Image: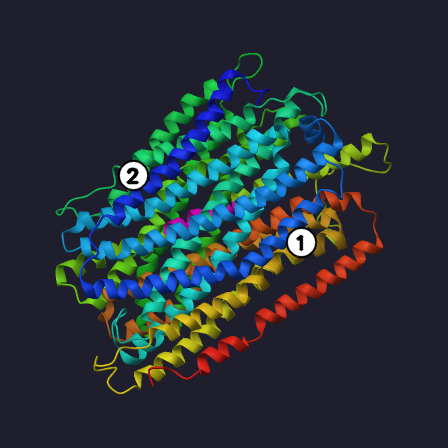
Amino acid sequence: MQDLKAVQSLAVWAVLVVSLLGIGYAFFIRSQILAQDTGTPKMREVWGFIKTGANAYLSQQFRTISILIVILTFVLAASVFIIPPTTEAVERFGSEEAATLWVAIGRAVAFLMGSLFSYAVGFVGMNVAVEGNVRVAAASRKGYNPALQVAYKSGSVTGMLTVGLGLLGGTLIFMVFGIAAPDALLGFGFGGSLIALFMRVGGGIYTKAADVGADLVGKVEAGIPEDDPRNAAVIADLVGDNVGDCAGMAADVFESFEVTLVSAMILGIVLGDAVVGTIGDGQYDLRFIIFPLVLRAIGVVASVIGNLFVTTDERKRNAMAAMNRGFYIAAGLAILASAAATPVFMVDAAGNVDWRPFFATLSGVVLALALDKLTEYFTSTHFSPVKETSRSSQTGSATNILSGLALGMESSVWAILVISASVFTSVLIYAGEPAATQFTSILYGVSLTGIGMLLLTGNTISMDSFGPISDNANGIGEMAGLDKNARNVMDDLDAVGNTTKAVTKGIAIGSAVIAAVALYGSYFTDVNKVLKQMMDQGAQGIELLSSINVAAPTVFIGLLIGGAVPFLFSALTIRAVSRAAAQIVNEVRRQFRIPGLMEGKVLPDYARAVQISTTAAQKELISLGLIAVLVPILVGFTLGVEALGGFLAGIILTGQLMAVFQANAGGAWDNAKKYIEEGHFGGKHSEPHKAAVVGDTVGDPLKDTSGPALNPMIKVINLVALIIAPIIVTIEPGNPGVIVAMVICLVALVWAIWQSKRESESLKEVAQAPASAD
């Protein structure tokens, strides 16, 4: 902090205050939500089932993953002692010994902080969503706007907590570590990404196992409504909306928010050093680090203001227009404020204003809007792709599924072209940069594109959480037997929520790719830092890594393995949903045979379906976490640092294509079903409707489990590669210790894949245990 100019120091303190205000505002909104009416005793009874199931799931999940968190905390701390600290760390802490100790402590603490912040966002966000859904149902009896306000504000708690905690962590790390911040920031980003992976995978398996099982037996076989209280899986389905779409999505976007900030600050430090002079001259241009922090603070304030304009009336009844209005107002304010901040914080030593970072940020805002509209086009009932999928249901479930597959594949192509155009924009913006700094400058511009894309994270998360909150409210309303007017309000909000969920998934996936590209650039700069230090110490035969030769056999092997990993992840998560859904199907069928249940005289045993989903979700967490951590380690230490770079390129490409394909295909199948339920092509209970339900159940694990899980997986693997890359280049090939370690890693990887593929004994025990309802 002592190296900052007065205005820069003031800005950092202001950013810290804004982050705390964002957190405070989240809890202020929470108090407003809790003050709302909770409705009738029957509504509170249903809500109680949901609340108990959601809290039990997340508590058990934390116990499952806490062991891995503790182990990785010590591993990260110990990894620092394998290689000498960076020049920046030595300059910051005065000596090599002090730098090693501080970086070890800092990386471990930052990892814990990132993990706990990510979990807190998911846990608190889910709890507020659960508190909000019954209050939305109660508010729907008063009118459309009251219900909209409660639903959106409930989501805003999660949104503001996401931006507040993400900004707080990044700011505190910079204030303590200064130019040595990248060492700790890697731990912060890794912690957030790993927890997001667990929350996404676990929540996704839970919600889709229950959803698929409930739909296949309830809608298709029994012909009863979606949230009929006679369906034993209906509570598990409603719980799943919270642990998957609220907790999972919140943690996912939180880690995207922090990772884009981490990559911008890492590249900003490298660029600031390159602009001033050579490494080790004791001078750094810190404006490249301060500007991303200022942008994030601007986004927090703009999101708060934009949320105030999300309102409608009983005549218009247009929730989507209200949320879009809030988003566009926030975007306009953020752009104007960012433009105003540029002449203050992006001035070089000669007094010239550098507008290029602002234009890179602006391109990120445009990218978010473009992906918003692109996703809406392919998943909304208002446009031809979803209508075409609905129409194809007239000839059976096979043609419905084929139409959805084609739609998802096409949408992925357009999404990657939009992202490519955004990256190329950064190339054009920094085209005139000197050759010595052009590569880093372009990547810094890409990282600012990610900052711009998630500049309005508060609004984005609010819109996403709005979906499951409205869905749960609709389910509570149906199970509690609310009047027709209230149900009409909730039906409309639920339909809008499906679109907002699909849109925010598109933004989350796009931000994951942009963040991964920026981290990919950080990979090169970090490797070259260590190589240059080795050259300065007299090491022979070393060349800086300026590019990767894909034609080299080891690099090509790395590329192939990287391209295959997203398919492995998707296969394992979809299989997990399929196995658990089969157990749910059998359980719901069994309970339908209980005398008096279909007549409404006997209450189903909801707890058994909840337990089946919970057990299935927990089984996959450690296995998939180990795969994400171990595969880059094996590739890097076995094939070398260049092959690891090829591996990262492969995983970014196929990960993006697979994620968008699965998310949009699943969203389209879901809304194609809803389009038929609105009365088109025969309406509810018709043959096209049954075909569309089958398509929806196929798409469920794609859009809410395997597709979204690829976002944090891509970033976890990139961050692991960043952490191990300096170790790889300093260790001699054929080192006996490395060989032994790789054998252990390989055994652990094989165990993780086998463990994920085999059917869980505990799941069998849950499904076969005697039932209290018999």
Q: Please state the horizontal and vertical placement of residue 222, each as a whole percent of the image.
A: 28, 80
Point out the residue furthest to the top here: 350
Q: Nearer the viewer, residue 607 or 228?
A: 607
Quarter the N terminus occupies: top right
Residue 590, position as x, y percentages in the image: 36, 84
Q: Earlier in the sequence, mark 1 or mark 2?
A: 2
Q: Which amino acid is tagged 1? A: Pro
What residue would you read off at disc 2? 307
44 is higher (above) or lower (below) than 26: below
Q: Which mark, by number, is residue 347?
A: none
CA distance for labels 1 and 2: 41 Å
Residue 664: x %, y % from top left: 41, 57
Query: Is residue 555 visible to us here?
Result: yes
**Element class at badge 1:** helix
Q: Which of the pair 403/39 is nearer the observer? A: 39
Question: From what the image shows, is residue 265 above or below residue 6?
Answer: below
- Classified by dominant secondary structure, the portion drawn in magenta counts as helix
Q: Is 486 positioned to the left or the right of 544 in the image?
A: left
Q: Residue at x 71, y 39 (%)?
A: 527
Q: Secondary structure at mark 2?
A: helix
Magenta stretch: includes residue 485: no
Residue type at mark 2? Answer: Asn
Please report the residue visible at 71 percent of the width from the left and 60 percent of the height from the top: 745
Q: Pointer 2: residues within 10 angstroms few (<14), some, or many (20+)?
A: many
Residue 100 located left or right of residue 340? right
Label drawn at residue 632: 1
Magenta residues?
502-513
Crowding around mark 1 (Cα neighbors within 10 Å: few <14, some 14 to 19, many 20+) is: many
415 or 451: nearer the eye? 451
Looking at the picture, does residue 276 appear above or below residue 450?
Answer: above
Residue 29 lies in what quarter of the image?
A: top left
